[in-house]
Amino acid sequence: MSKDRASTSAKLSRRGLLVGAAASPLAAIALPAAAETRPSEPVDHVNLNMEVPFYGSGGQAGVETPPQRYIHFMTFDLTTVNPRDLQVLLARWSAAIAQMAKGETIGQVEPAREHGIGFDTGEALDLGPASLTVTVGLGPEVFSERLGLAAMKPQFLRELEHLPSDAFLPQFTGGDLSLQACADDPQVAYHAIRDLARIAKDTGAASTRWTVMGFGRASAGRNQATPRNLLGYKDGTRNIAEPEDFDRFVWTRDDPVWGGMGSYQVARKIKMHIENWDVDRVSDQNNVFGRFKVSGAPLTGTDEFDTPDFGKTDAEGNHVIPRTSHISLAAHENNDGIKILRRSYNYTEGINEVGLLSAGLLFISYQNDPAHFERLQQRLGAADRLNEYISHIGSAIFFVPPAPEEGHYIGQQMFG
C-alpha cells in the first residue's frame, strides 16, 4: 500500500460521526469474547468522514484497505471490440472514482438548465466519503484477440478450472469487468456503482451482468475485530494482515509486464442453506468449522487466536479438530503454506420461491496466482463438512491492476 493511502485523512462534514462497533448488533456479540482474551485488541470504529485516496503508487484501494462495513459488487460484459471504447470507459471510471472517494459528486446533480438531466444521481450528497473504495478488475476476455490486447494479458489470468463445489447459475457467473465498491455507508457504495454503471452505459462500452449487495463484512483486516458470517461463526481469524504476507501472497511482482502490484480477484456467490443449519446441534456445528461458536477458539484451544493443533487426538484416537472441518482443510499448515486474502461479505435477498431465507456469502479473495485459490477450494469442495450447508452458485475471476498515479487512469499502461 502506498504511503499516501495508508495515511487516510479525515475531514469534518455535516455528517461528522464517530460510531463504535459496540453500536452494531454484530459487534455486540463479537466484542465481549474478544475483550476477555485480547484486552489490547483495537476497537473497531467507523468514521464516516474518512477518505481512502484512489490514486497511489502501489496496489488499488480496496485490497489491502481494512474492509469497510458494506459492499456493492457488480460485473459487466464488454459491448465493444474497439479498445478505444474500453480506454475511454476506464479513464472516465477512474476520474469518477477519485471524486467519489473524496465524498464529492461526479458532476451536476441539479443542472441550471430547466430541462437538464443531472450527471450525478445525488443520493450520496451529505453522506461523507465513508471510506469508499472502488476496485476495478479486468476479466480474461479483455485480453482476447478481439480487442488487440492479447499481448498485455497477465500471466496467470484465465478462467478458473472446474471445482468440486461448483453449482453455478448463469445469472451469477462471469463478466469482463468488475467493480468492488466498499464503504461504511451502504448508500455511498450503492451510489458509486449506480453512477459508474451509468457511465458504462453512456460510453456504450459495457453492460451490467450480475451484482450482489453485501453487509457485515465477513473477514477481518488488520486492527479489526473478527466479524461473523451468517452461520454465526467468526470468519477470517487467520486472514492475511501483515504487509509481509501481502507482498508474498497477494501482490504480483513483474506480472503483467506493464505493471506489478496487481492481484488476481476471485469472486464467488455462496448460498447458505440457513434453515438446515439452524436445526443442527451446536456441537456438530463446532465440528464442521473446527472452532467454538461463541469464543471462536479452535477446538484444541481456549482463545480465538490460539494456533490450532491439527494433530491433537482425544482418548479414542480421534482428531479433536476433525480433518474434514473447514479450518483444517483451509489451513496454510495443511496446504504447503499457501495463504489467500479473504475480503468477503454477508448477503441476503429476502426469501426464495419456496419461502426459505435466501442468504449467503459473497466470497472475494485476492492472491498473486489463482491456482492458490483452486488448490484450497479443491480440498474444501471435495471434503469440507460445511458443503452440506452451502452451494457455490456464482463465480468470476479478474485481474486487478495497480493503482494509477494522479493524472492517469486504471490500466493505462496496457494501451501502450
Image (tube, rainbow, N blue to C red):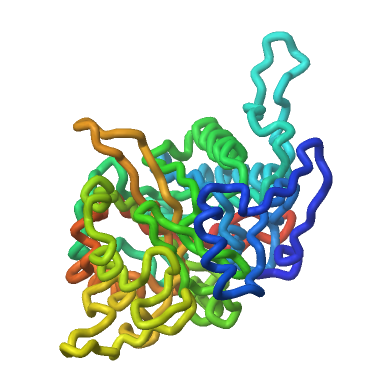
Could you say where residue 315 lies in the image, as x and y percent from the top left?
20, 90
Residue 106 vs 384, above or below: the answer is: above
Q: Quadrant of residue 370?
A: bottom left
Residue at coordinates 19% horizontally, 32% vertically from top-left? Answer: 354
Residue at coordinates 78% horizontally, 16% vertically from top-left? Answer: 112
Which residue is more in the foreground, 329 or 118?
A: 329
* Residue situated furthest top in the rendering: 114
Does residue 213 appear to the left or right of 290 in the view shown? Answer: right
Q: Quadrant of residue 113?
A: top right
Could you say where residue 346 lies in the image, as x and y percent from the top left?
42, 50
Which residue is more in the foreground, 135 or 176?
A: 135
Could you say where residue 39 lies in the image, as x and y percent from the top left?
63, 73
Residue at coordinates 70% horizontally, 36% vertically from top-left? Answer: 127
Residue at coordinates 69% horizontally, 58% vertically from top-left? Answer: 55
Residue 197 vs 73, above or below: the answer is: above
Does residue 293 appear to the left or right of 416 in the view shown? Answer: left
Residue 300 vs 22, above or below: the answer is: below
**How many numbered callouts?**
0
Could you say where residue 299 lies in the image, as x and y percent from the top left?
34, 77
